[in-house]
Image (tube, rainbow, N blue to C red):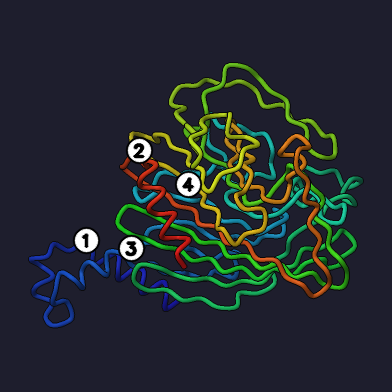
Amino acid sequence: MINQIKAGLYAGLLLFPISIMGILGENVTSSDELSEMATSVTLVRKDGDKKVEVLVNGHLFTSYLYSEKIAKPVLFPIKSANGSELTRGFPLDPRPGERVDHPHHIGLWLNYGDVNGLDFWNNSDAIPEEKKAGYGSIVHREINRMSDGNGKAELEVTMDWIGPDGTVLLQEHTTFIFWAEGDKRMIDRITNLTAQGKEVFFKDNKEGMLGIRVARELEHPSDKPEIFTDASGKSTAVPSLNNEGVTGHYRSSEGIERDDVWGTRGRWLNLSGVIKGEKVSIAILDHPKNVGYPTYWHARGYGLFAANPLGQKAMSGGKEELNYKLMPGKSLTFNHRIIIYSGVDATDKILNTDYAEFTSK
């Protein structure tokens, strides 16, 4: 309740002209204080809805959702500084004209397609009950810490990666850091995975690992239908749609563009486009301390944007192989930053500067 009041006060104060705020007395005395209020980031916990909302100046940036119905916690939706929805609505909040394939692609998530033979990536309510034995789920367990204030907020959570028989394979501790700097938004996802009672084997698989499913406007224009097959052999048809307003364009740190980024390595990958007249970009940054650095990109023109550091044999066409193993009690940490730019061209120079800042810590 306190956070809700704070968020409302921040949003309300921003509506007052400075001339009116001047009469409020000593509580508002300088432009520096007003500037700090203009970057307030607050967390609002809503246990009944199984979510934590992230607000910037009282406006929704994203929400941490942990309903068991979606097989893993996600951030959804994700919005730009001007309120444009960057993530696809389907299946939680469908919008006209968007694709309805791959119902497991929801917002921003992290999981993998082969963990001790179980598919965590493709699990959703679309999987028939008789086939559920081959899939794993990630279950939210606890909100450990929340803090918010000027410019950033932090959310620490615990999750379990469980098999269909209830066995916990991995315990996940993740810290989300949400940043607001003018019209730039950032999300740091720092994920620690600890193997529980037995060895955990991440077999090389193309279905991974940190993924975002983007809005229709950020897809690449397509002129033909395609069929994509997952590691279990299940095929999903992705039809060709009306390309009006579809403006997405991938570019990696290595200068590779469009659909050619799939199966290549890079320190960062940027997806740019225009949504309702707003120029936007989403960039995922990989950290040098991550396993598999620089990551392979499992990025498709139809709107899947993912970093996959573990699926090296699948992503390299057999030229490399990792098959990462984690012994009981041992941990693996991934650190990624997602940057959302609004109203600017996110050039290589800008991205390299932001990348240097991210990796300097």
Closer to the camera, 284 or 316?
A: 316
Reply above or below: 13 against 300: below
Q: Dot 1 lies on which element? A: loop
Q: Mark 3 highlights which residue?
A: 57
Q: Earlier in the sequence, mark 1 or mark 3?
A: 1
Tell me the distance, in whole angstroms, between the alpha carbons under discs 2 and 3. Answer: 21 Å
Q: Earlier in the sequence, mark 4 or mark 3?
A: 3
Q: Mark 4 highlights which residue?
A: 283
Name the spot of residue 176 as percent of width and height, x first.
Answer: 53, 66
Name the spot of residue 357 as percent of width and height, x first.
Answer: 41, 60
Q: Residue at x 51, y 31 (%)?
A: 257
Q: Mark 1–mark 2 contact, CB under 8 Å?
A: no
Q: Nearer the viewer, mark 1 or mark 3?
A: 3
Q: Mark 1–mark 4 contact, CB under 8 Å?
A: no
Q: Where is residue 142, by image quadrant?
A: bottom right
Tell me the distance, in whole angstroms, between the alpha carbons under discs 1 and 4. Answer: 31 Å
Q: Mark 1 highlights which residue?
A: 15
Closer to the camera, 65 or 217?
A: 217
Q: Residue at x 31, y 42 (%)?
A: 344
